[in-house]
Image: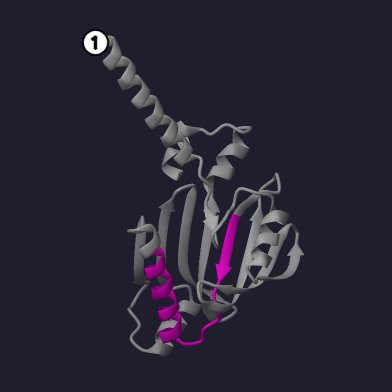
Amino acid sequence: MKKVLLVIFSAVLLLSNTNLLAQNREHLKFMGISMDMNVNSFVKKLKQKGLIYVKEDNKLIVLTGKFAGHNNCNIFIFPNSENKVQCCATYLTYRDDWKNLQTDYITIKNMLIKKYGKPMSDEEEWDGVKPTTDYEKMTAVRNGKCKYYTSFYVNGGLISMCISDVLGYGQVNLKYIDRLIDYIGKNNGKIDRENGIEDL
């Protein structure tokens, strides 16, 4: 009887570990598409979703289109050394007023919380004296003094978002970083589970 229970316990443990390893091998998804593919195939799938190819610049792919309900977004696809998708960055529409910029940020943040749960880090601060008017807040954005930043650890990677200055305008930008691709690449196809577990 003890041997039977030991066999059952071992089988349950093995299945649990197999399921855990399968979960840890998931890749991050961007716009519902797994980032586990070469850049050309990934771009083709994004174009099928309505994004428009703009250009390729030193292996960086640039597209434009609708993202999470926001029009006129710029999407950048960064490949790794093996031409697989490593990172996707999205910049929402330029804003020259704080109200619309903050609305963009809060809307996307709340959508991410609804999908992924509580963020790993969440900061909404200002360097120096807190601005009070729209003009003061946008001036702080342009001077790099707006510290709005949120990040989420999710299966296969990291999603981060922030408010930043781009050419004198405020923009919300998001980065989707597939950590599994990074670890597989560094270890010749093997995942360093000891050191990489917190990134997955």
Q: Can residue 164 be found in the magenta stretch?
A: no
Label 1 crowd (10 A; few <14 / some 14-19 / many >=20): few
Location of the C terminus (image quadrant):
top left
Find residue 119 and report its image quarter. bottom left
Name the residue located 61 percent from the left edge and 48 percent from the top edge. Answer: 36
Q: Position of residue 195 (x, y in %)?
A: 46, 35
For this view, does 101 lie left or right of residue 75? Answer: left
User: In the displayed structure, would residue 23 be above or below residue 40?
Assistant: above
Residue 88 included in the magenta stretch of the image: yes
Q: Which picture quadrant has residue 152?
A: bottom left
How far from the left and from the top, in percent, is residue 85? 64, 52
- Pick the front one: 192 or 17: 17
Q: Position of residue 186 (x, y in %)?
A: 60, 37
Pick the residue in front: 120 or 10. 10
Image x and y of residue 72, in percent: 60, 79
> Who is closer to the viewer here, 141 or 102?
102
Q: Is residue 120 above or below residue 173?
A: above
Q: 31 or 86: nearer the eye?
A: 31
Q: Residue at x 45, y 44 (%)?
A: 199
Q: Secondary structure at mark 1?
A: loop
For the residue marked with disc 1, what is the amino acid?
Answer: Met
Q: How is the image coloured?
A: one colour
Q: Which residue is mark 1?
A: 1
Can you say whether 78 is above or below 96 in the image?
above
Disc tally is 1
Which residue range is magenta in the image? 87-112
Q: Where, quadrant-wise, is the N terminus in this rendering?
A: top left
Q: Which quadrant would residue 120 be assigned to in this image? A: bottom left
